[in-house]
Image: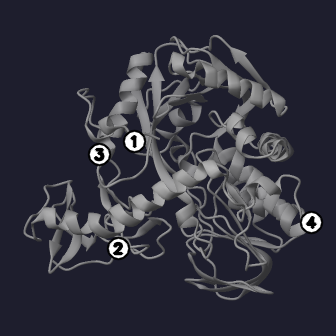
Amino acid sequence: MSDDPADTKPDAYAGPDPASFRPESLWLATTPTTDYEPFENGLDVDVAVVGGGITGLTTAIELKEAGRSVAVLESDRIVESTTGHTTAKLTSQHGLLYDTLLSEFTERKARQYADANEAAIEAVEQRVDEHDIDCDFRRTAAYTYAASSDDIEQIEDEVQAAQRLGLPASYVEETPLPFDAGPAVRFDDQAEFHPRKYLLAIAEEIHGDGSYVFEETRALDLEPGSPCRLETERGEVVADDVVVATHFPFHDRAGYFSRMHPHRAYLLAVRIEEEPPEGMYYNTASPPATMRTHPAGDAAAADEDAALDADEELLIVGGQSHKPSVSGVPTSERYRRCERFAREHFSVESIEYRWSTMDYSPVDRVPFIGKIDPFSKHVYVGTGFNGWGMTAGTAAGMILSDLITEGSSPWADIFNPQRLPPKSAAKTFFEENSTVGGSFVGDRIKSLLRSLGGDAADMPATGEASIVRRTGRPMGLYRDEDDAIHAVSAVCPHMGCLVRWNDAERTWDCPCHGSRFTHEGDVLSGPALEGLPYREL
């Protein structure tokens, strides 16, 4: 993630308006929409799983295969939120991480992290084979390369640490990239796939024989106990155990909002003239760049107007990872920067899709997987995957299933949500929370509102939005293409931060903890459970 002061200024480069790119993830564009029924009041199951992404569905299939009855409850449609907007790398190579793990945790715990993520890749491949799932799964190498000569020593240290932990790591002077990428750490036998194809097939295996997948069913509250009682907008589910597999835990008595912070990244799927390089790529720049390829066949079939050859490979390229903030460049500029990177390094013919993703990073970079808090014996959580949710979410499903059915997991210790963070993480913890607590919730809002100096008469232009105040209350105004004004409260209901307009995706985004809302105020993703109230002009 970048905190560079230059981050607040648009680049001189001016590419096409990002609104002209197809504003949809490749994964959503090339798979059908699901239509599972909403929950109806009155259900008793062994395990209720809240969240229909890779963590929730993996947990559910593992539990069903272990003989448990399961109900998956998704607030919208399954595999459309975070999992539907991933880069879809299945890899245990998570940037330059293992040297840090060895220095801040015991070698036993660092090995647990490595083994869990390697096992996750194997588990996906095994399930693909067992169920004959056509999801473009293929093994490939993963590279993290040095963005500058100053990073070479870190690459060398990472290779040594990864090899010490038994990972398939090696030091290479060159990569298959068509530009000078510098030395890299290479992991062999990693994988890439189409996440929605994989998970929609898994959902079909879950639904039936006493287990269920419910959509359009938002969880509102949870009463831990024996049994647990899960309140939804459509009634109550009673379960022996509950797994909270939402992007951010909707049940947060343990203060997860203070222990992990959000960051957003941006992706493009592009056609290039040359043969795309094999492998998956990440670099040490700040912010880092990410790349991988994917067969264009599905994209060509999904769009009658697309000039795509089914045998082509699209290049997924992106990055621009940053913490949401009140200041900073607009979202459209982030996409332009991704496009500039692509055009500087490849011969880009066209940009087919563009999408963004939100991730949460714990202060020590290790996910939270296990008992959700010390007081809730039968409630579990999987969250904070630090941008590597395809492997970490799969590993979480395996760990949580073992904890529920067996009472233990060989990989659980390092992911324990009740762990104390290393001393080195304390600085990050205090920096993140002082920024949120001081800058955004208190003085920042007051000074921002004073600086606005306007009222509801200051209307935005067509397709634009602004924040104004009226009778002392901040309001978010958006004028749509039909010239209609949509007015909502500009205060996030989670903890009172002022939202910011996302000009490329036309959403209101909270800079404190990552909640997102439609232009009409409806919740797209938490931690907020309620929307932005409608305001009268």
Q: Which element is circle 1 on?
A: loop
As shown in the figure, which amino acid type bears the numbered disc 1?
A: Asp
Above or below: residue 278 compared with residue 58: above
Q: Which mark is residue 532?
A: 2
Figure quadrant of residue 151: top right
**Between discs 3 and 1, the one toward the N terminus:** 1
Is residue 301 visible to the viewer in this orientation of the structure?
yes
Q: Which residue is mark 1?
A: 3
As shown in the figure, which amino acid type bears the numbered disc 2?
A: Leu
Q: Which element is circle 4 on?
A: loop
Q: Disc 1 to disc 4, how far (Cα)?
A: 44 Å
Q: Which residue is mark 3?
A: 330
Q: Disc 4 to disc 3, how far (Cα)?
A: 48 Å
**Between discs 3 and 2, the one toward the N terminus:** 3
**Between discs 1 and 4, the one toward the N terminus:** 1
Q: Which residue is mark 4?
A: 406
Q: Position of residue 535 (x, y in %)?
A: 24, 78
**Between discs 4 and 3, the one toward the N terminus:** 3
